[in-house]
Image: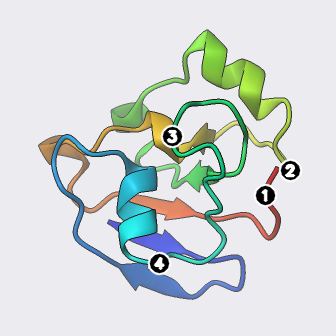
Amino acid sequence: MTFVDSNGQPRTVEGEVGSTVMETARRNDIPEIAAECGGACACATCHVYVDEKWTEKVGKPSQMEEDMLDFAFDVKPNSRLCCQITVRPELDGLVVNTPAQQG
């Protein structure tokens, strides 16, 4: 998967099937992903924008995730908390962008 930072710099890393996009970001020291709650969907510090080519495959956020997104910075229709996106084979090549600021 590829993380594109707020300056437009891409960084491609391997994700482990069954882990989350947030766990992948932390294992690979992706900047701009704070993940303060460790993946409990209790903060909005792993906010990403899913590339529009991938939004359908990633799916929609749960109600709990939508509630947490209310605390995120500059929420857009393609906003997700990456702790709630599980890495699976059909997401091979996923592209997400990180906002300039978290939560």
Quarter occupied by the N terminus: bottom left
Q: Is residue 49 above or below residue 37?
A: below
**Earlier sequence position, callout 1 versus callout 4:** 4
Kind of residue at badge 3 = Gly
- Quadrant assignment, res 68: top right
**Mark 1 residue element:** loop
Labels in figure, total: 4
**Which element type, helix, strand or loop, lies under badge 2?**
loop
What residue would you read off at disc 2? 73
Q: Which residue lies under the disc numbered 3?
A: 39
Measured Cα–Cα span from mark 1 to mark 4: 16 Å
Marks 1 and 2 in Cβ contact (< 8 Å): yes
State the image coordinates of residue 60 (x, y, percent, origin top left).
51, 23
Q: In the image, residue 38 lies at what x, y percent? A: 53, 46
Above or below 65: residue 32: below
Where residue 99 appears, x then y in whole percent? 74, 64
Mark found first going from the N terminus, 2 or 3: 3
Residue 29 marker: 4
Judge the density around disc 4: few (<14), some (14-19), many (≥20) Cα neighbours within 10 Å. few
Looking at the image, is mark 2 or mark 3 nearer the viewer? 3
In three-dimensional space, the C-alpha distance between marks 4 and 2, rounded to whole angstroms, equals 21 Å
Whether residues under marks 2 and 3 lie with C-beta atoms below 8 angstroms apart, the answer is no
Residue ID at (63%, 41%): 78
Mark 1: which amino acid?
A: Gln
**Residue under pointer 1:** 102
Q: On screen, 30 above or below 37?
A: below
Instruction: Tell us which disc is closer to us: 1 or 2.
Output: 1
Q: Quick one: label 1, few (<14), some, or many (20+) residues within 10 Å?
A: some
Mark 2 to mark 3 CA distance (whole Å): 18 Å
